[in-house]
């Protein structure tokens, strides 16, 4: 403890000097390569946002930034006018909201059940199995999902019905995607809630028992309020990432029939940017997604603050 | 009176245990059954598969689907590439993450704040797909180079924070003692910090390895000539839409079922990870919990 305090004092006194740099040369050597890596692979693409305000097509791609025509906000306007843009935005938001709602509810429910069950060994086996789909790639999940859910697939055969989960061009496809995603991640997502539950004061449960509360009452009045801060933090993060629906999952699970309801912003940026070689337009779509994401994150964070909840940032 | 009431509560509480047991059994079936079915179809006789005769145990057990995919789809090369990127990517990732995490755990390091901020910002803002694509393909010319699998995704900031919080929880006394003995910062990291970090490094190694093994988008975008298992499976999925007439197929001597083949590749792409993760469970559950602590 005293060592930490001493270290803290040292920080305050520090001023830049060649002497200090020499003293910390190993630390510099051990971190500078990664900072350079960071600048190249993360910050140069950020600088690439300038392309959103230019016309960038293969013919002028090799030109320097200042030689390309600046077009102001034209790329953004073109994106918003695109016949696919509105549907894409609706898909993205719809998938996100449905995904956050169903995913969070299921993960909490699963964690609650794991927390309650008293057969210890059985609980461990269930948990291990529940992690399994999380570690499997989306390509594999898509391969399995198509076997199970396609028309005439396993589920159709089992139920003797034609569900059309993978072949109905309507928001039903969002539900299909969200259910597959929940199946994949519920066990993994429950870990955080379980660890939050483990942190709840056991004395509260004892006191409730003495007062005659049954298990459901204890869950409702002790466990759920106990994990509320965790739920809020994860919801903030979820809302902050609401537009960042990955293209990989959508691309792999969809097919030509349901494409209208599978398209999301990141994929749309790829289709317009690389598929149609309109790099400026693609960058603009990506930039829109990123900026709105940051605004959403701050908004969710603010609202959580107003509601008197712990904030993320 | 009070006693009977508490007994009633108790018996109701015990019923809940058995309800939970039943629900969990159902969940286990829902989770595992699709995988078992994939396994069965991959060992199923192709003609049975085509006639839609699928059992959880194949009627006629055969290796022919596996032999076919390794011979016809060049699965051996894909398997090798997948293993290679997993081993190199996870190895390099863990070492680099641990090194950076140590430096950023040192509050006395002059650039600590600046570097940490630079890294954390990238968790929230990214340039997006198009600028990254142009950087890798046009400026750095990494298209179809193996290093495109390793370098751009070398360090995940989330993993770095995980390791850093772990290091910050270690007692400082050991580092101080080594410094008094004349060890420099690199030696302290390599000899003292690194061995103590083993649990969190196991977690992080698993995350990197799973990420590498499962990665599909980077092959799709940047390196189609270096197909990994995931990409081969994707290609098979894309072209397996062709339907074969079962009666005609029956007459063929070496019948091939697209579904059986796809399932065989699915198994090859899945099994290595399924074998590894249960052994690392105690590590990653701990690791996730560290990550849940507010930074």
Image: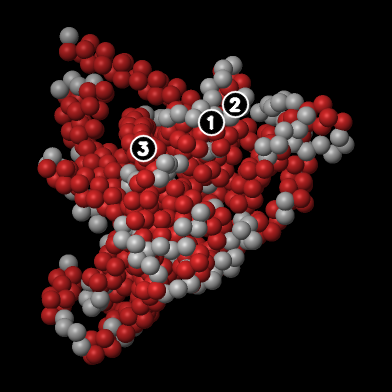
| Residue A52 visible in the snapshot | yes
Identify the mark nearer the N-term, 1 or 3. 3
Neighbourhood count class around disc 1 (C-alpha, 10 Å): few under 14, some 14–19, many 20 upward: many
Question: Where's residue A177, x and y in %?
Answer: 46, 35
Identify the mark nearer the N-term, 2 or 3. 3
Mark 1, residue position: A166
- Seen as rendered, the residue at the extreme top is B1
Neighbourhood count class around disc 2 (C-alpha, 10 Å): few under 14, some 14–19, many 20 upward: some
- Foreground of the two, A268 or B274: A268
Q: Seen in the image, is B14 located left or right of residue B54?
A: left
Q: Secondary structure at mark 1?
A: loop
Identify the mark nearer the N-term, 2 or 1. 2
Q: Are marks 1 and 3 in contact (CB under 8 Å)?
A: no
The answer to whether residue B247 is above or below residue B154 is above
Residue at 22 percent across and 76 percent down: it is B108
In which quadrant of the rendered view does residue B1 lie?
Answer: top left
Residue at 46 percent across and 52 percent down: it is A272
Q: Are marks 2 and 3 on the same chain?
A: yes
Q: CA distance from mark 2 to mark 1?
A: 7 Å
Foreground label between 2 and 3 = 3
The answer to whether residue A92 is above or below residue B33 is below
Q: Chain of mark 1?
A: A
The answer to whether residue A218 is above or below residue B139 is above
Residue at 40 percent across and 62 percent down: it is A55
Q: Which mark is residue A151?
A: 2
Question: Where's residue B286, x and y in %?
Answer: 36, 51
The answer to whether residue A165 is above or below residue B255 is above
Q: Are marks 2 and 1 in contact (CB under 8 Å)?
A: yes
Q: Which mark is residue A90?
A: 3
| Quadrant in the picture for the C terminus of chain B | bottom left
Neighbourhood count class around disc 3 (C-alpha, 10 Å): few under 14, some 14–19, many 20 upward: some
């Amino acid at each position: 403890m005293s060592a930490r305090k001493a270290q803290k004092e040292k920080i305050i006194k520090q001023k830049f000097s060649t002497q200090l740099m020499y003293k910390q040369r190993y630390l510099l050597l051990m971190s500078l390569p990664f900072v350079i890596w960071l600048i190249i692979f993360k910050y140069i693409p950020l600088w690439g946002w300038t392309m959103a305000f230019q016309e960038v097509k293969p013919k002028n791609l090799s030109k320097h930034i200042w030689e390309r025509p600046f077009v102001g906000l034209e790329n953004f306007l073109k994106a918003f006018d695109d016949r696919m843009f509105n549907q894409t935005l609706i898909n993205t938001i719809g998938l996100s909201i449905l995904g956050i709602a169903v995913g969070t509810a299921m993960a909490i429910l699963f964690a609650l059940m794991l927390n309650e069950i008293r057969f210890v060994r059985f609980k461990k086996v269930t948990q291990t199995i529940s992690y399994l789909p999380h570690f499997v790639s989306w390509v594999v999940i898509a391969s399995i999902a198509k076997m199970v859910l396609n028309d005439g697939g396993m589920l159709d055969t089992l139920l003797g019905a034609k569900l059309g989960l993978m072949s109905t061009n309507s928001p039903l496809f969002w539900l299909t995607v969200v259910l597959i995603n929940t199946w994949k991640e519920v066990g993994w997502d429950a870990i955080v809630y379980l660890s939050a539950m483990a942190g709840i004061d056991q004395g509260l449960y004892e006191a409730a028992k003495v007062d005659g509360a049954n298990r459901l009452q204890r869950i409702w009045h002790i466990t759920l309020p106990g994990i509320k801060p965790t739920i809020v933090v994860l919801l903030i993060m979820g809302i902050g990432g609401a537009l960042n629906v990955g293209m990989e999952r959508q691309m792999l699970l969809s097919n030509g029939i349901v494409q209208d309801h599978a398209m999301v912003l990141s994929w749309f940026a790829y289709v317009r940017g690389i598929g149609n070689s309109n790099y400026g337009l693609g960058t603009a779509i990506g930039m829109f997604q990123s900026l709105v994401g940051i605004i959403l994150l701050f908004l969710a964070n603010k609202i959580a603050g107003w509601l008197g909840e712990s904030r993320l940032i | 009176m009070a006693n009977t009431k508490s007994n009633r509560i108790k018996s109701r509480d015990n019923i809940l245990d058995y309800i939970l047991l039943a629900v969990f059994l159902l969940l286990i079936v829902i989770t595992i059954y699709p995988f078992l079915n994939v396994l069965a179809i991959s060992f199923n006789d192709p003609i049975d598969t085509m006639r839609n005769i699928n059992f959880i145990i194949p009627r006629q057990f055969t290796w022919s689907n596996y032999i076919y995919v390794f011979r016809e789809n060049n699965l051996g090369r894909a398997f090798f590439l997948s293993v290679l990127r997993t081993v190199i990517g996870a190895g390099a990732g863990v070492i680099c993450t641990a090194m950076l995490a140590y430096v950023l755990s040192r509050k006395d390091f002059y650039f600590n704040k600046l570097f940490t901020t630079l890294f954390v910002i990238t968790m929230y803002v990214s340039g997006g797909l198009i600028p990254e694509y142009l950087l890798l393909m046009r400026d750095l010319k990494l298209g179809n180079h193996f290093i495109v699998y390793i370098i751009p995704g070398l360090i995940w900031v989330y993993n770095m924070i995980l390791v850093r919080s772990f290091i910050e929880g270690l007692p400082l006394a050991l580092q101080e003692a080594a410094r008094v003995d004349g060890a420099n910062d690199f030696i302290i990291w390599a000899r003292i910090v690194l061995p103590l970090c083993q649990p969190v490094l196991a977690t992080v190694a698993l995350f990197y390895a799973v990420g590498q093994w499962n990665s599909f988008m980077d092959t799709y975008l940047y390196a189609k000539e270096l197909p990994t298992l995931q990409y081969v499976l994707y290609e098979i999925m894309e072209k397996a839409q062709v339907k074969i007439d079962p009666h005609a197929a029956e007459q063929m001597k070496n019948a091939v079922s697209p579904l059986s083949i796809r399932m065989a590749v699915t198994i090859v792409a899945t099994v290595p990870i399924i074998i590894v993760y249960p052994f690392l469970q105690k590590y990653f559950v701990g690791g996730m919990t560290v990550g849940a602590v507010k930074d």
